[in-house]
Image (spheres, rainbow, N blue to C red):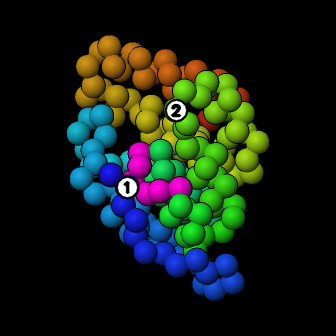
Amino acid sequence: MTHTPHTPRTPNGPRLTLADVEALARAAHTGQTDKAGRPYAEHLRAVAEGVRARGGDAEQIAAAWLHDAVEDDALSERWLDEAALSRRTKDIVRAVTKRAGEPPEAYAGRVLATPGALLVKEADLAHNADPARLAVLDEPTRKRLTEKYARMRALLGLVGDADPDA
């Protein structure tokens, strides 16, 4: 079910602050859990902090908080269109939003073609592939996800890059 928090269109007015974006993202994902049963907001926080640790700016951190919102139907495309966010933040969110039936190569190409999106996706993959998170999953799921994340890292040219979270 898509939540639609009221965020007026304000093209020339004040933008949502990072605190506003965090609160909206947490509210939109209320009740959702990750594959290990943890509150989904923990993943959002980890990705936002990963972006910050990698030198990301406020627009990228905002996109990190919202990176799964449209994909998970926590917020609608219309909400994103009308949100008081920068065009760049919206573009990053759209770039990292997977589309049904989309090949991984097309997804990676969109991420690479969108300024600022690679850093958000890198932080997302780093948290998703965290051995401590994966350790609580059953072996077939852990193996499948490890391979999936490694493939995406390769498609994005992130293989061998240092991970500041390590």
Q: Is residue 98 above or below residue 114?
A: above
Question: Which secondary structure class fits the magenta region best?
Answer: loop
Crowd rating for badge 1 (residues with CA inside 10 Å; few <14, some 14–19, many 20+): some
Left or right: where does residue 20 sit relative to residue 160?
left
The residue positioned 34% from the left and 28% from the top of the image is 134
Residue 112 is covered by the magenta coloring: no
Q: Is residue 42 above or below residue 141?
A: below
Amino acid type, label 1? Thr
The residue tagged 2 is 100
Q: Nearer the viewer, residue 95 or 5?
A: 5
Q: CA distance from mark 2 to mark 1?
A: 17 Å
Task: Classify residue 36 by image quadrant.
Answer: top left
Total marks in image? 2
Image spot of residue 37 (x, y percent):
23, 39
Task: Classify residue 102 by image quadrant.
Answer: top right
Residue 74 is covered by the magenta coloring: yes
Q: Residue furthest bottom?
A: 13
Cβ atoms at labels 2 and 1 below 8 Å apart: no
In the structure shown, which secondary structural element does the residue marked by tag 1 occupy? loop
Image spot of residue 46 (x, y percent):
43, 51
Identify the mark at residue 137; answer none if there is no mark.
none
Image spot of residue 88 (x, y percent):
69, 61
Along the polypeptide, which appears first: circle 2 or circle 1?
1
Q: Visible in this render: residue 141?
A: yes
Amino acid type, label 2? Ala
Q: Which residues are magenta?
A: 72-77
Q: Visible in this render: residue 46?
A: no
Q: Nearer the viewer, residue 120 or 27?
A: 27
In the structure shown, which secondary structural element does the residue marked by tag 2 occupy? loop
Image spot of residue 42 (x, y percent):
34, 51
The residue tagged 1 is 2
The residue positioned 73% from the left and 47% from the top of the image is 114
